[in-house]
Image (cartoon, rainbow, N blue to C red):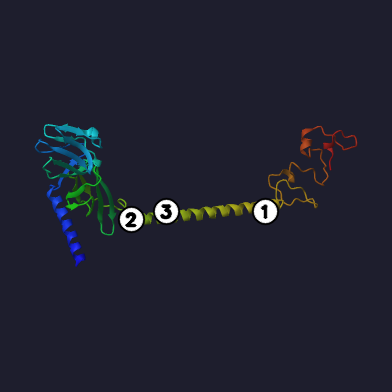
Amino acid sequence: MNIFQKSWRSILGVLLVFFLQSSCTDPVVEVHKAVGDSLDLIANFSKEDLEVKWKLNETDLAEYAKNKLILLKSQFYKRLEMNEDNIGITVKDLKLQDSGILSIVAGTSSIQYPTKLIQLHVHDLIRDVQIELNDSWLLSKNICIFNLRCQASGDPNPSYSWSGYLVKTGPNLNISLHPAESATLNCTANNTVSIKHTTKTVECKEQSGTVLGNAGFPQMYLLIAVGVSIIVIVIFSGTVAACCRWRNQTGQGESEGGITVYEDVNTDGIAKKRPGSVVNGMSIYETVDDMKVTQNLPQTLYDKINYQRHPAVSANTSSPYQEVL
């Protein structure tokens, strides 16, 4: 029984505190402002014996007592202006970080006025709106597919809506058109303090291929074609290199067999092979063969140089190049 009585008293105490707090506080007023705007915070009370405090999220901004208004150091300190006639302050050049709950607490030595609460929302202005477009040609259905995205600068979280050809909310829009069809699309971006819109016209043109924009499956076919081309080039290059190597090895074997224009006469006095360009069966490196020369004609390259050759070879021959083998 005692436990029940204690629990009941606790519940009544919580309800009483909640009731008293509610009775001393006005309903919260929501205020939306743009970056750079100003906000007036006026204490509409009688000046007699009045004391007032202005707060932002429980941080004191200014106070009024004994008919004197004092600005306190805070994030608003250099952006506050006093209004002693109306007992109020003005916050100038609002910033995004100024969003929060502002309160005006006022009373006298005998009266406590209800606290005024203001929920302040500071928003960026929407500066510009653009429509991004990706299109593709779907050959199987003979249609154009358009993927559109609306993008606003300024406020990072505005609301988007589409109108014109199709009514829709949200930043993205997908439509399909048949050849020769066109559509005009309007995108609007807005928040509580600003609004901007832009318009774009799209037209479907029939394509002979499969790709008009960034379609998924044509890219796959393109990659396959590139891969096959690379493989064909590699095989062709390898085949050409192998053929060239085989031909070089075959030519080298024939040269090592001694079939050249510089071949000497073999032991039988007969050349293995002689090219047709060699005159009288001799090369410029050959001397007179075993056949006896019956004429006093030049028989070697060196004989041609000395036309006054001695008619007979003897031990007194002055030049060793005149001896005939």
Label 1 with label 2: CB-CB less than 8 Å: no
Query: Closer to the camera, 128 or 12?
Result: 12
- Marks 1 and 2, the one that precedes in the sequence: 2
Reading the image, the residue beneath label 1 is 253
Q: What amino acid is at disc 3?
A: Val
Label 3 vs 2, first from the N-terminus: 2
Q: Amino acid at mark 2?
A: Gly
User: Which type of secondary structure does the marked residue at label 1 adopt?
Assistant: helix
Across and down, in percent, residue 235 comes to 51, 56
Residue 244's x, y, as percent?
58, 52
Residue 140 percent location from the top left of the image: 28, 59
Q: Is residue 149 rendered to the left or right of residue 313?
A: left
Q: Is residue 71 visible?
A: yes
Please name the residue shown 42% across and 53% down the image: 226
- Alpha-carbon span between mark 3 and mark 1: 42 Å
Which residue corresponds to the image point at 54% horizontal and 53% vertical from the top-left?
A: 240
Disc 2: CA contacts within 10 A as few (<14), some (14-19) or many (>=20): few
Which residue is label 3 attached to?
Answer: 226
Q: Residue at left 37%, top 56%?
A: 220
Which residue carries the number 2 mark? 216
Left or right: 143 as drawn, with respect to 217? left
